[in-house]
Image (cartoon, rainbow, N blue to C red):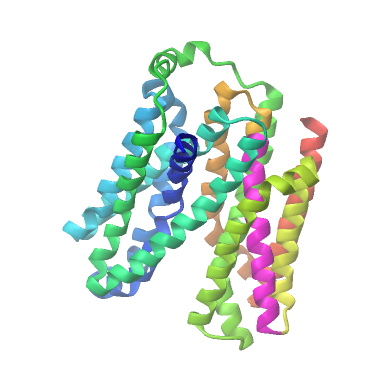
Amino acid sequence: MKQFLEKASVLSLSLVLITSFSISSALPAMFDYYQGYSTGQVELLVSLPSFGIMAMLLLNGVLERIFPERLQLTLGLLILSISGTAPFWYQDYYFVFVTRLLFGLGVGMLNAKAISIISERYHGKTRIQMLGFRGSAEVVGASILTLAVGQLLSFGWTASFLAYAAGLVVLALFLLFVPYDKEEGKVSKHKHEELERLTPTMKWLIFYLAIAASVIVCTNTAITFRIPSLMIEAGFGDAQLSSLVLSAMQLIGILAGLSFSFLISAFREKLLLVAGITFGVGQIMIALAPSLCLVVAGSVLGGFAYSIALTTVFQLVSEKIPAKLLNKATSFAVLGCSFGASLTPFVLSGIGLVTTNGRMTFIILGVWMIVTSCLVSYLLKKRV
């Protein structure tokens, strides 16, 4: 029971990692409230944490030298919870702007650590299973908080921010059930003296995997942005129905996490290639679908492959990089994810210069994903 609670508490750290957009359903009410501000300025309040996450990931190496792991995770959860719920108490635009940026900084303090802590504490088959479960935990956390926001909206849009109090629950689980390593503070204090340096081979590995993560996240975010308009354009349904399709696409990530251990055993080093190509094929299926059923099938296939591909990136990092360097390596991989999410609007704008056809957009994204997967897999095999 003790081991189960420890594993569950370690996994709970990932529940809050992708919840920045969970308050999106409060946007219509926020548009009404902030009438003196443009739509873009209000929407920025939702996406702003991404910049905070990227900034903190860049500073991760410095934080690792200053703070022991336990203190860094505790501070991250406290900053996330306090800044996340702050708009409930005070709604001035610039105050909310700052608190959303702080929220991103809090998530950034957790992001790489929530992944590297698994690779540091667990090994072999247990590590692979935990990395798979961690991917599922992200999806479950985002789904639960999105649902909570929907329920809290009945009390006003400000109440929706109370959903981020979930970070305090995660903090309690972590402090109660994840054992403290007495040597941790000592190790952290002198870590900069003891750490091995990244070799050129390791740097290339991290660089290639960061590129893969960036494209994987970018194409997935693009799907999220464009499926509603594609479904309406094709006459398959309205925005409400498209939200159900996107929910199915997200929730299939739970199954992907549970099956990750089996898939890594079956495909081994080829899993990133297989998952990337499958993800691309799912996007092309969506583009060519003559009916709603095939749009759903393509979305579910894409969602499953997306989760597997992204989890494989972190599994490869944990497998190829020494334990002492895992947090630094993981930070760069997560930075690739954040960069990919930030890049999405520009990629879609670039595609828009070539074509305004919704179906063609998905074909381009699918081909981009397939080509990237093949190229990264080839480079990994050749150089690493």
Q: Which residue is drawn at 34% across and 35% down?
A: 176
In the rendering, at what x and y percent does residue 383 appear? 79, 31
In the rendering, at what x and y percent does residue 1 appear? 46, 38
Q: Indicate whether 341 appears above or below 159.
A: above
Q: Does the magenta stretch include residue 296?
A: yes
Q: Is residue 79 magenta?
A: no
Horizontally, is 177 left or right of 300 in the view? Answer: left
Q: Indicate whether 293 appears above or below 193.
A: below
Q: Residue furthest left?
A: 90
Horizontally, is 27 left or right of 138 in the view? Answer: left
- What segment carries the magenta color? 291-317
Q: Does the image show residue 287?
A: yes
In the rendering, at what x and y percent does residue 150 appear? 35, 70
Q: Indicate whether 259 appears above or below 327.
A: below
Magenta span: helix, strand or loop, mainly?
helix
Q: Which residue lies furthest to the bottom in this view?
A: 235
In the rendering, at what x and y percent does residue 138 appear? 50, 52
Q: Residue at x 55, y 67 (%)?
A: 224
* Nearer the observer, 326 or 138: 138
Horizontally, is 40 left or right of 244 in the view? Answer: left
Looking at the rendered image, the quarter that the C terminus falls into is top right
Q: Indicate whether 335 appears above or below 285.
A: above
Q: Does the image show residue 38?
A: no
Quarter of the view holding residue 307:
bottom right
Quarter of the view holding residue 232:
bottom right
* Nearer the observer, 203 or 123: 123
Q: Which residue is drawn at 64% across and 85% down?
A: 234
Horizontally, is 34 left or right of 223 in the view? Answer: left
